[in-house]
C-alpha cells in the first residue's frame, strides 16, 4: 500500500484525525510567527523606518481580522475541511511572497496574506478539535485551543531565529521549510472526516456577512473574563512586534536567535502554564495569571532600565505565566458553556478580541517609538497591560457571575 493510499485509512480514526488537526494548527500558527525575528533584518536590508515596520505588523492584523469576521463561522455550515484547506493555500501563497520579497510592498502583501490565512482557519481548526476530541478526554480540545497559539508562536520564532542566524539565505530559507510542512498538513487535512452540522446554502452565504457571534449562554462569562484576554494578548503584541528590537537596541545583543528567544520565552512559558493549570479551578488560575500580568511587565521595565539581560528574560518568564494563565483559563471558562452549534463562530469572536488586543496597542507603540523613544514606550505599554490586568482582577470580585453556569463549565472541562 502506498503512503498516499494509506492516508484515508489513517484519517478514519478520530484520534489520529484529532492530532493531525492539532499539527496543522501548530504549523499554521508557527509560520505566522516566523517573520518576527526577521524584522531587524528587513529594516537593515530595505532601509525601513519604525513606522514602516509597524505597518508590516499592522497589515497582518488587518488581514486576519477581516477574514476572521467574514469566514469565522463558515465551517459551521460547509464543514471544517474546505475552510482549513482554503486557509492552507493562502498561507503557502504568503510564504512564497515572503521568500521572494525584495521591497517593502512585497512584505506588506506577504504579511496581509499571512494574516488572512490565520483568519480563515482559526475558527475551523479550533472547532475541528472539539468535534474530534475523545469523550474520555473532554477537556483536551479546550486546552489545545488555548495552548496551540502560544506554542505555535514559540516554534515559529525559535525556528526562524535559528535559521536566520545559522542557515544560508536567511530571508527565504525558513519560508521554504514552512511551505513543505504546510503542504504535508494540507494533504492530510484533505482526508479529514467531517462532523460539522449540515446547513443550507443560504445559511452558509449569510454566515459570510461580517459579524461577531456570541451565543447567549456564553455572554455573561465572556464579559467577566474578557479583560484577561485583552491584557494577555496586548502583552503578546509587545513581544511579537518589538521583542527582537528591544534585545538588539536596549540590551545590545546582536544575535537573531536572542531576539527570537525573547518572543519564545513569553509564548513558551505561556503554553506550559496553560498545560500546568488545566487541573486547577479556571477562575482561580486566571486570577493568578492577572497578578502575573501586573508584576511581569513591571519587572521587565526595571530590568531594561538596569540593562540586565538575565533580569529581562526572568521578568519575561513571569509575564509568560500571566500570558498563559490569563488567556487560556478565560478561554476554558467560555468554551465550557459554548453550544455545539456555533463553536467556530464563538472561537472566531474570541480571536477577534485577542488579535485586536495583539495588534492595536503594538501598532500605537510602534508609532510612538520615533516620538518618545523605545524605552519610554515600553514603560507606557507595561503600564497599559498592568492596568488592564488590575481591572480584570477587580471584576472577579465585583461582578456576580452566574455561579451555577461556572460550575457546569468546570465539570464539563474535567
Image: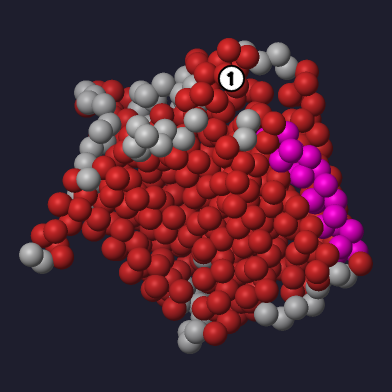
Residue 282 visible to the viewer = yes
Indicate the position of residue 29 as horizontal and vertical percent values.
47, 55
Q: Is residue 291 left or right of residue 12?
A: right
Residue located farthest toward the left when viewing the structure as drawn: 1
User: Which residue is outermost to the bottom?
Assistant: 168
Give the quadrant of residue 23.
bottom left
Name the quadrant containing residue 179: bottom left
Q: Which residues are magenta?
A: 286-305
Question: Would you name the residue on which mark 1 appears?
Answer: 406
Across and down, in percent, residue 15 comes to: 29, 45
Rendered residue at 74%/38% (across/down): 288
The residue positioned 34% from the left and 62% from the top of the image is 182
**Residue count near mark 1 (Cα–Cα under 10 Å), binned few <14, some 14–19, many ≥20:** some
Please state which of residues 23 and 115 is positioned toward the viewer in this rendering: 23
Assess whether residue 304 is covered by the magenta stretch. yes
Q: Nearer the viewer, residue 315 or 369?
A: 315
Query: Is residue 227 visible in this depiction of the protein?
Result: no
Specify the principal SS of the magenta part: helix
- Of the 4 image quadrants, the one containing the N terminus is bottom left
Q: Position of residue 129 (x, y in %)?
A: 37, 40
Query: Is 17 within the magenta?
Result: no
Q: Position of residue 337 (x, y in %)?
A: 49, 22
Amino acid at each position: 500500500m502506498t503512503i498516499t493510499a494509506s492516508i484515508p485509512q489513517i484519517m478514519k480514526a478520530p484520534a489520529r484525525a484529532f492530532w493531525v488537526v492539532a499539527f496543522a494548527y501548530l504549523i499554521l500558527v508557527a509560520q505566522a510567527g516566523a517573520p518576527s525575528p526577521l524584522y531587524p533584518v528587513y529594516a537593515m536590508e530595505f532601509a525601513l523606518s519604525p513606522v514602516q515596520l509597524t505597518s508590516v505588523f499592522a497589515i497582518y492584523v488587518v488581514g486576519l481580522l477581516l477574514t476572521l469576521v467574514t469566514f469565522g463561522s463558515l465551517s459551521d455550515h460547509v464543514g471544517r475541511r474546505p475552510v482549513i484547506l482554503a486557509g492552507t493555500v493562502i498561507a503557502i501563497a504568503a510564504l512564497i511572497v515572503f521568500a521572494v520579497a525584495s521591497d517593502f510592498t512585497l512584505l506588506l502583501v506577504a504579511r496581509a496574506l499571512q494574516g488572512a490565512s490565520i483568519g480563515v482557519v482559526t475558527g475551523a481548526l479550533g472547532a475541528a478539535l472539539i468535534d474530534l476530541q475523545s469523550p474520555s478526554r473532554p477537556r483536551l480540545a479546550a486546552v489545545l485551543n488555548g495552548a496551540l497559539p502560544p506554542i505555535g508562536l514559540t516554534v515559529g520564532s525559535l525556528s526562524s531565529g535559528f535559521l536566520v542566524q545559522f542557515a544560508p539565505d536567511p530571508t527565504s530559507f525558513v519560508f521554504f521549510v514552512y511551505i513543505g510542512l504546510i503542504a504535508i498538513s494540507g494533504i492530510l487535512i484533505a482526508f479529514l472526516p467531517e462532523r460539522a452540522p449540515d446547513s443550507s446554502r443560504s445559511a452558509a452565504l449569510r454566515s459570510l456577512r461580517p459579524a461577531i457571534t456570541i451565543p447567549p449562554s456564553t455572554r455573561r462569562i465572556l464579559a467577566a473574563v474578557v479583560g484577561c484576554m485583552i491584557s494577555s494578548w496586548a502583552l503578546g503584541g509587545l513581544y511579537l512586534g518589538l521583542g527582537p528590537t528591544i534585545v538588539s537596541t536596549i540590551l545590545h545583543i546582536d544575535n537573531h536567535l536572542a531576539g527570537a528567544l525573547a518572543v519564545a520565552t513569553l509564548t513558551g512559558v505561556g503554553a506550559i502554564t496553560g498545560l500546568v493549570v488545566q487541573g486547577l479551578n479556571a477562575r482561580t488560575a486566571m486570577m493568578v495569571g492577572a497578578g502575573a500580568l501586573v508584576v511581569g511587565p513591571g519587572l521587565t521595565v526595571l530590568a531594561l532600565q538596569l540593562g540586565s539581560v538575565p533580569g529581562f528574560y526572568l521578568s519575561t518568564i513571569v509575564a509568560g505565566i500571566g500570558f498563559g494563565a490569563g488567556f487560556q483559563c478565560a478561554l476554558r471558562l467560555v468554551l465550557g458553556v459554548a453550544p455545539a452549534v456555533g463553536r467556530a463562530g464563538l472561537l472566531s469572536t474570541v480571536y477577534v478580541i485577542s488579535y485586536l488586543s495583539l495588534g492595536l496597542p503594538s501598532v500605537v507603540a510602534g508609532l510612538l517609538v520615533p516620538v518618545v523613544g523605545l524605552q519610554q514606550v515600553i514603560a507606557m505599554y507595561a503600564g497599559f497591560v498592568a492596568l488592564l490586568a488590575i481591572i480584570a482582577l477587580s471584576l472577579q470580585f465585583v461582578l456576580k457571575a452566574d455561579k451555577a453556569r461556572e460550575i457546569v463549565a468546570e465539570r464539563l472541562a474535567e
